[in-house]
Amino acid sequence: MKISGQDVLLAIDVQNDFCTGGALAVPGGEKVVPAINRIAQGFANVVLTQDWHPRDHVSFAANHAARQPFETVELDYGTQVLWPTHCVQGSAGAEFHRDLDIVGPSLVVRKGFRRGIDSYSAFYENDRKTPTGLLGYLRERELKTVFVAGLALDFCVRYSAEDARKAGLEVVVIEDACRGIDLDGSVAATHRSFKALGIAVVGFEALL
Ligand code: VGL
Ligand code: ZN
């Protein structure tokens, strides 16, 4: 697979809190870092996302009376998983993993920064309609194929890949440059969804 100037690498939430020792550690999360570093060298266009929550964020179990992490609540925009407090704005947990080595031009999209709404996708908040602006950025730059990697496969990678595909972009998920949380079969559901939507899944060596 040859990478062109119309391709963009979208590296999702490669942050300390999603790596071993972090507040919402994804098993093996840090293992995506060397793969993403390698792949990124081949791209002229890279977009990073950064989960970026205020401390009183609605997605944190600690902000709901008598609720535990990984339970769900019904909010005005739909069902929301309650998470351990993670990626608090300005905290060490919200920083990119120290070994993430993206050089050259790149755009950072911060998401989940409004207290009352979560944002898994790089494109839309969890009401599924408030845009982050990334789609406009890709369109204006005439970027047509989005290669997605990062954390977590079954949440922010999944939602980002699905939204890109639904917007008419070609989407390739780099499976071994992702790791999943896997709540109630969410990794298997993610693979079924990718198949149904025509989202390609490859290993990172296919891009070298
Ligand atoms: C994520 C849960 C909560 C993710 C972010 O990056 O997949 N998951 N916030
Ligand atoms: Zn989050």
Image (tube, helix red, strand yellow):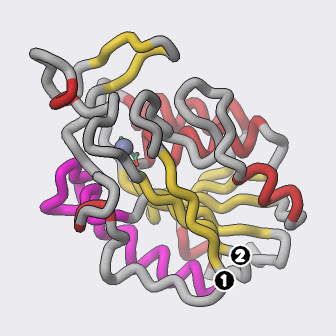
Q: Which of 46 and 31 lies nearest the eye of the viewer? A: 46
What separation in Å lies between label 1 and label 2 (alpha carbons)? 7 Å
Q: Which residue is drawn at the image coordinates 46% and 65% (left, top)? A: 177
How many numbered marks appear?
Answer: 2
In the image, residue 101 above or below residue 62? below
Image coords of residue 44 (percent x, y): 73, 82
For disc 2, the marked residue is: 45
Q: Secondary structure at mark 1?
A: loop
Residue 21 located within the stretch drawn in magenta: yes
Q: Which residue is drawn at the image coordinates 32% and 35% (left, top)? A: 57
For disc 1, the marked residue is: 105
Image coords of residue 202 (percent x, y): 59, 60
Ligand 2 falls in quadrant: top left
In the image, residue 10 above or below residue 123? below
Q: Which residue is drawn at the image coordinates 66% and 83% (left, top)? A: 105
Q: Secondary structure at mark 2?
A: loop
